[in-house]
C-alpha cells in the first residue's frame, strides 16, 4: 500500500467509524507500530495528523475558484506520480543491494570455508602424452547443465544422476580426442547455466533442490569433470562466465552479474585447484571473458543472454578494439555457427520448453582443436 493510500485509509477510518479498531488498522496497513502509537499520532490532540490534514485541506480550497482547485488537484496528482516513481526506484535499489550483499557475503563465507578444505590431490598421467609430434591447442565448450532440473519425457530423461553420467562421458570423450590430436593445452570454457535456478515458474517447478544446493552440486560435478581431464592434459585453463539461470531475482531487468549465484562456482573451483596445473579465471562482474591463443588469436566466451550469434563477433571486436577469432556461447541449447560465433549445445538436452517449441535439442557439447590457421569442431553427443 502506497503512502497516500495509507493516509486515505486512516481518514476514512476516522470519518466513518464511531468505534475505531486501531489494532486492525495496524494489521491492514502492515506496519510495525503499536496500536496506541498510531492512534495518538493520527487522532489525538488538535495537532494530530488527521486534524492537521483537515485544516490544510480547508485552507487549500478556501477562496479558490473551480479552475484553481482543478489546477491544484492536477499538481497534486503529478506530485503523487513522481513520489511513486521515486519509491519504485528506491525499492529496486534496496532489492539490488540486498541481493548484492547476499551473494557477496556467500562468496566471502565460502572462500573462508574452502581454506579449511585440503586442495585436490592430482594423479597425473602425462606419460601418455606424445612429445614426439607437434602439439596442439583446443577449447572445450561446456554449458547449460541446469543442475537441479528434472525432465521426464519420451525424448529425454534428466536428473542429477543423468547429469553426472553425461559429464563423466563428456570428460572421457574430451580426453580421448585430445590424445588423438596431441593437445597439450586445453582451454575449458564454462559458459554458464550450471544451475536451473529460480528465475521463473517453470524452472521452480522442475527444480529438485534449493538454489544453494544446486550451486554446491554443480561445483562438485564440474570439479570432478575438470580434475579428470587435467590429469591427462599437461596444461588446463578454465574460464567461467555466468548464465541467466543463476541470477538471484526472477525479473529479467536484474542483469547485474554481481547478483548471480553462479559466481560462487568460481570461488569453489579456484580454491579446489589452487595447488594443481589448473588455472581458473573469470572476469569479475562482466558477462564475458577474453583470452588469447598461443599464436595470438583472440577468443571471447560468453553465455549468450545479451548477444545474437549473427552479430556477437562483430560487436565484441568493435567493443574491445581488436580482432576476435572466435566467440563461444551457450544459452540457445542448439549447436550453430554464424559469422565467427560458435553456439554450444546443452548437457541437459530437451526439456519442456524445447519440446513445446518443437526444437531438436540432443545433449551435445563441442570441442574445437586449433591447427595452424584452421580449427576443427568435434560434436560430442551424450547419452
Image (tube, rainbow, N blue to C red):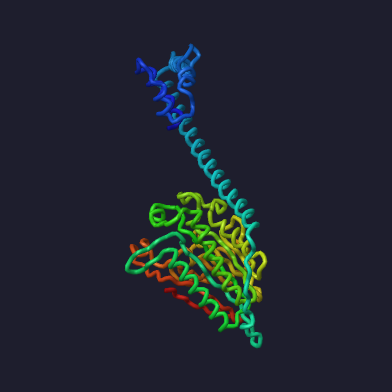
260 vs 118, left or right, is: left
Image quarter where the C terminus lies is bottom left
**How many numbered dots are placed on residues in this image?**
0
- Between residue 35 and residue 298, name the one nearer to us: 35
Q: Residue at x 43, y 26 (%)?
A: 26
The answer to whether any part of residue 39 appears in the image is: yes
Identify the residue at horizontal 38%, vertical 54% (top origin). 205
234 in relation to 210, above or below: below
Rendering coords of residue 226 (x, y %) = 57, 69
Does residue 74 appear in this view?
A: no
Where residue 155 appears, as percent x and y from the top left, is 34, 69
Q: Name above or below for residue 248 compared with residue 63.
A: below
State which quarter of the image contains the N terminus.
Answer: top left
| Residue 259 screen position, x and y as percent | 54, 51
In the image, 351 versus 91, the foreground residue is: 351
Q: Residue furthest bottom?
A: 132
Q: Most extreme residue toward the top, as rendered?
A: 46
Q: Which x, y percent locates residue 200?
A: 42, 52
- Of all residues, the one furthest to the left in this rendering is 154
Nearest to the observer: residue 114 or residue 193: 114
Asked if 323 appears above or below 106 in the picture, the reply is below
Amino acid at each position: 500500500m502506497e503512502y497516500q493510500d495509507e493516509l486515505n485509509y486512516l481518514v476514512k477510518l476516522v470519518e466513518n467509524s464511531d468505534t475505531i479498531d486501531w489494532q486492525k488498522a495496524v494489521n491492514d496497513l502492515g506496519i510495525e507500530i503499536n496500536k496506541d502509537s498510531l492512534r495518538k499520532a493520527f487522532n489525538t490532540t488538535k495537532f494530530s495528523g488527521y486534524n492537521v490534514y483537515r485544516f490544510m485541506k480547508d485552507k487549500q480550497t478556501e477562496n479558490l475558484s473551480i479552475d484553481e482547485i482543478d489546477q491544484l488537484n492536477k499538481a497534486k496528482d503529478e506530485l503523487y506520480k513522481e513520489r511513486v516513481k521515486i519509491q519504485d526506484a528506491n525499492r529496486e535499489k534496496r532489492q539490488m543491494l540486498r541481493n548484492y550483499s547476499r551473494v557477496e557475503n556467500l562468496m566471502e563465507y565460502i572462500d573462508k570455508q574452502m581454506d579449511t578444505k585440503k586442495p585436490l590431490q592430482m594423479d597425473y598421467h602425462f606419460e601418455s602424452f606424445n612429445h614426439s609430434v607437434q602439439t596442439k591447442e583446443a577449447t572445450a565448450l561446456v554449458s547449460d547443465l541446469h543442475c537441479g532440473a528434472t525432465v521426464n519425457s519420451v525424448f529425454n530423461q534428466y536428473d542429477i544422476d543423468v547429469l553426472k553420467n553425461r559429464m563423466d562421458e563428456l570428460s572421457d570423450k574430451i580426453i580421448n580426442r585430445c590424445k588423438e590430436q596431441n593437445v597439450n593445452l586445453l582451454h575449458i570454457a564454462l559458459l554458464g547455466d550450471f544451475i536451473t535456478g529460480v528465475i521463473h515458474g517453470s524452472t521452480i517447478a522442475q527444480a529438485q533442490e534449493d538454489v544453494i544446493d544446486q550451486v554446491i552440486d554443480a561445483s562438485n560435478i564440474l570439479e570432478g569433470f575438470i580434475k579428470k581431464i587435467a590429469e591427462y592434459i599437461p596444461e588446463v585453463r578454465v574460464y567461467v562466465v555466468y548464465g541467466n539461470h543463476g541470477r538471484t531475482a526472477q525479473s529479467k531487468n536484474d542483469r547485474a552479474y554481481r547478483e548471480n549465484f553462479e559466481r560462487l562456482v568460481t570461488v569453489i573451483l579456484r580454491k579446489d585447484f589452487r595447488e594443481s596445473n589448473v588455472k581458473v579465471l573469470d572476469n569479475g562482474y562482466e558477462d564475458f571473458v577474453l583470452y588469447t591463443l598461443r599464436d595470438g588469436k583472440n577468443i571471447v566466451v560468453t553465455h549468450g543472454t545479451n548477444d545474437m550469434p549473427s552479430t556477437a563477433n562483430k560487436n565484441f571486436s568493435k567493443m574491445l578494439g581488436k580482432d576476435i577469432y572466435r566467440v563461444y556461447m551457450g544459452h540457445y541449447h542448439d549447436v550453430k555457427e554464424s559469422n565467427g560465433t560458435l553456439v554450444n549445445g546443452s548437457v541437459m538436452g530437451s526439456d519442456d520448453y524445447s519440446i513445446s517449441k518443437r526444437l531438436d535439442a540432443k545433449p551435445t557439447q563441442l570441442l574445437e582443436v586449433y591447427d595452424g590457421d584452421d580449427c576443427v569442431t568435434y560434436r560430442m553427443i551424450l547419452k
